[in-house]
Each structure stands twice: as C-alpha cells, then as structure tokens.
C-alpha cells in the first residue's frame, strides 16, 4: 500500500522512518525542491513538486495512494491547500501533521503579527539592527524598510540583488543558545523577527532573545485548510495511516 508524505520537515522524516518499519507499506516522500541540499528521508523520494493542485490530482489518480500526509512546513500554505483540493477531488484520505507553535513564556517580549508585511511595518521603533530569520524568500518584503540593518540567516543564498543594508549568513539548525547569544552579541542585534514555525531545531534564538532582553516580532502561521484532520505528533500520524491506508 502506497503512502505519500508531503515532506521537507523533521517530522516528515521521522514519519517516513516510522511508516517504513511497518509491513505492507510503500512510503514515498515528496520534497518541493526549495532547499538545494535537503536532508533526505527513508524510502523513495520525489523532488520538485507536482505543479499545483491539478498536477497533484493527476499524480494521485495515476498512482492511487491509500493515504496522503501533509507534513510540510507550517507556513507552506500553498502546498497544504493544493493537497486538500487534490485529495478531495480524488477521495484519497488526507492528514495534516503540523508541529505545535512556540508558546510564549515569562520574560518573552513578543509582538505577534499576522504577516511578513505586518512584521516589516512594525520594526521601526523596536530596534535598528534586526536578526531576520524568516527565510531567503522574505527579503523583498523587508527591503523597503529604511534606516535599519538586517542580519538575514538562511539555508540557501537568496536571489540577487541583496539590498545593501542586508548581510546574509548561510547556516542550518539545530542551533544552540550559546551560539545564538554569541551571534547576537557579535552583530549587536537588538530585535528578532521570526515565524512561528515551532520545533526544537531553531528554538534557541527565542531563548537567547529572552535572556538578552530582545523584543521578538513573531509572525503567526497561516490557518490549516478546513476539513482536514490535524495532528501534532508523529506517533499519532503513524496510527492514523494504519487506520486509513487501505
């Protein structure tokens, strides 16, 4: 029985490993191809996406998977919506696996905003040297903000031209609190902008910001598609696949 995982996250890799250990399941993971050198899951891998909901619908009709698990990044809204449309059109059971967002704790100075544009608009007055951890594709949103300096961290280089007030460093988590504190101190950063991605791989920046008294502009994640069952735990996703793939 074929199970398709829409992946690219640590949870997707853990799910692929868990399902591959079950007898009678063939696991195929799809990666969108946005990272040049992704961490690969166990099992078969296809890369490059499907070409929107119509392309995914055709793939599902041709290959007939018993179930699909959307374990993409919590901000991969387009892919999640495509999966919901394609699975509804083909009748394939669909589960969303989304890790919980980060909880705000005592000592955190967070400003929650609904979008990257709102984050850019909120920055003036919060600080002058910005630690930007919202991904390389977000740079054009922040480029028009004048009077600020940005340290942008991403896995792959952004598309040129990079604004003159943006310094890019290439790195991939997991990160440590000590390392994040050192980076913030080295570049004299005084405000952090991030997306509410959740997970442990990149949470250290939030701990460092709390310890150093930095305000955090937190971009809320988009809502999950309506009508799709959602779980936050890989073990629950494995159980769901066992119950629905067939």
Image (spheres, rainbow, N blue to C red):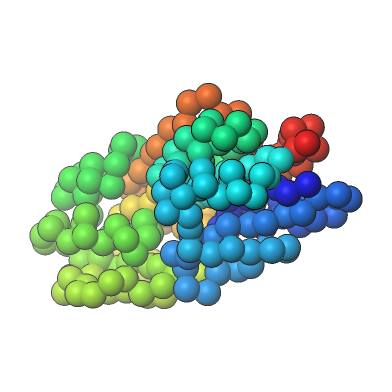
x, y percentage for residue 128? 20, 59
Name the residue rendered at 40%, 37% in the picture. 222
x, y percentage for residue 40? 63, 67
108 sits to left or right of 42? left
Q: Nearer the viewer, residue 220 or 26?
A: 26
x, y percentage for residue 61? 59, 43
Q: Is residue 121 above or below residue 151?
A: above
Q: Quadrant of the C terminus?
A: top right
Residue 60 visible in the picture: yes
Count of numbered circles in the view: 0
Name the residue rendered at 59%, 63% in the picture. 46
22 sits to left or right of 111? right
Q: Is residue 72 above or below residue 160?
A: above
Name the residue rendered at 64%, 50% in the picture. 63
Q: Nearer the viewer, residue 198 or 2?
A: 2
Q: Nearer the viewer, residue 43 or 50?
A: 50
119 sits to left or right of 28? left
Task: Residue at the far right: name it.
Answer: 23
Q: Nearer the viewer, residue 244 or 184?
A: 244
Q: Is residue 165 above or below residue 234?
A: below
In which quarter of the view is residue 140 placed? Answer: bottom left
Residue 183 visible in the picture: no
In which quarter of the view is residue 219 placed? Answer: top left
Task: Residue at the far top: name it.
Answer: 227
């Amino acid at each position: 029985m074929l199970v398709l995982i829409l992946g690219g996250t640590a949870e997707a890799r853990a799910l692929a490993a868990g399902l591959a250990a079950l007898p009678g399941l063939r696991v195929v993971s799809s990666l969108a191809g946005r990272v040049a050198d992704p961490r690969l899951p166990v099992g078969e891998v296809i890369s490059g996406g499907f070409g929107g909901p119509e392309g995914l619908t055709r793939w599902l009709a041709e290959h007939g998977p018993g179930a699909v698990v959307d374990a993409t990044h919590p901000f991969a809204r387009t892919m999640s919506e495509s999966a919901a449309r394609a699975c509804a059109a083909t009748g394939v059971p669909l589960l969303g696996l989304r890790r919980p967002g980060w909880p705000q704790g005592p000592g955190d100075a967070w400003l929650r905003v609904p979008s990257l544009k709102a984050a850019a608009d909120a920055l003036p007055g919060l600080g002058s040297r910005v630690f930007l951890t919202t991904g390389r594709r977000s740079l054009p949103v922040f480029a028009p903000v004048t009077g600020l300096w940005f340290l942008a961290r991403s896995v792959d280089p952004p598309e040129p031209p990079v604004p003159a007030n943006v310094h890019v460093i290439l790195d991939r988590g997991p990160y440590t609190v000590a390392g994040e504190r050192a980076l913030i101190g080295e570049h004299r950063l005084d405000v952090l902008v991030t997306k509410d991605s959740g997970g442990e791989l990149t949470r250290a920046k939030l701990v460092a910001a709390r310890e150093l008294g930095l305000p955090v502009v937190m971009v809320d994640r988009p809502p999950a598609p309506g009508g799709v069952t959602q779980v936050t735990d890989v073990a629950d996703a494995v159980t769901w696949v066992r119950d629905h793939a067939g």
